[in-house]
Image (tube, rainbow, N blue to C red):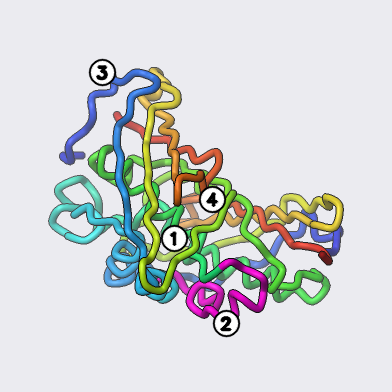
Amino acid sequence: MTTAALPDFDALAVGDVVAERETHLTRDSLVRYAGASGDFNPIHYRDDVAAAVGLPGVLAHGMLTMGLAVQPVADWAGDPARVVDYQVRFTRPVVVDPESGADVAVTAKVGQLDADARAARIDLTVTFEGATVLGKAQVRVVLA
Amino acid sequence: MNPELQGREFPPTAPYVVGREKVREFARAVFATNPINHDVEAARAAGHADIVAPPTFAVVVQEHTLAQLLAEPDAGIDFSRVVHGDQRFTSSRPIVAGDELTARLTVSSVKTLGAHSMVTAESVITGADGEHVVTAISTLVVRGDD
């Protein structure tokens, strides 16, 4: 029995923006994600290591960007369990400045509707400094 | 990278018990503020046995299988050259606190594109009852000599 607010599937149309959010990342966010996920690759917290391997700076974990980008959709869907499929391609890194951090913007739009399953494919546009950082970012949400 | 890795199946990982505080910790780390991720009462009111893990939580379990792959003596994968290409999670049901999960890795493809190699690793994650919970698929790009 599900009681969390359910969006009205029949009111959705392809192209509708269902959620928008901007998330501010700091170096603290990266350390927190490293601990929570177990991914301790030092390119996500050490400037010297990032520079030594030729990176423009310390990068957010791709999986952190993927993880935060789906949250506006999970909230819109009312229950994170309604997210049944989620895929992304990592196309550009998010460089997190030690002082000013990084802002990641997410726009979630209806890409396709499956009336039989009452499922929506939500397409995410995820940007940092005006450029897309995730490609083919698609979330399947069952609204039944 | 060794092309013979394609099709290789690995033994199941030791069971991973999903702790309630681990779910909350992971949820905070990915900016998940939904009460169903944090509050047992809210999760139960929504029909779940316990708090629900965020959609990408399976990566914590998948990580154990990728460690198996990188440790494979004949794999020839230099970890310092690995870049994450794609990621996908396909779920049969959400992960909830209290789950005991086992992951089984198969290398579904190995491709070479110029100096780079691409390996697609598929981790099938099942519950204590043996039923499918989620499949995590990663494509890793191993950069060749620049």
Classed neighbour count for the residue bearing mark 4: other residues with Cα under 10 Å, few (<14), some (14–19), many (≥20): many
SS at circle 1 = helix
Between B132 and B73, the one nearer to me in the picture: B73
Classed neighbour count for the residue bearing mark 3: other residues with Cα under 10 Å, few (<14), some (14–19), many (≥20): few
Q: Quadrant of the C terminus of chain B?
A: bottom right
Q: Which residues are magenta?
A: A36-56
Q: Which residue is mark 2?
A: A48
- Rendered location of residue B40, percent (x, y): 17, 60
State which chain disc 1 sits on: A
- Rendered location of residue A62, percent (x, y): 51, 59
SS at circle 4 = strand
Which of discs 3 and 1 lies nearer the camera? The answer is: 1
Same-chain status of marks 3 and 4: no
Res A55 seen here: yes
Q: Marks 4/2: CA distance?
A: 36 Å
Q: Which residue is mark 4?
A: B135
State which chain disc 4 sits on: B
* Residues under numbered marks 3 and 4 in contact, where contact means CB atoms less than 8 Å apart: no
Q: Marks 2/1: CA distance?
A: 21 Å
Q: Amino acid at mark 1?
A: Leu
Q: Is residue A84 left or right of residue B85?
A: left
Which of discs 4 and 1 lies nearer the camera? The answer is: 1
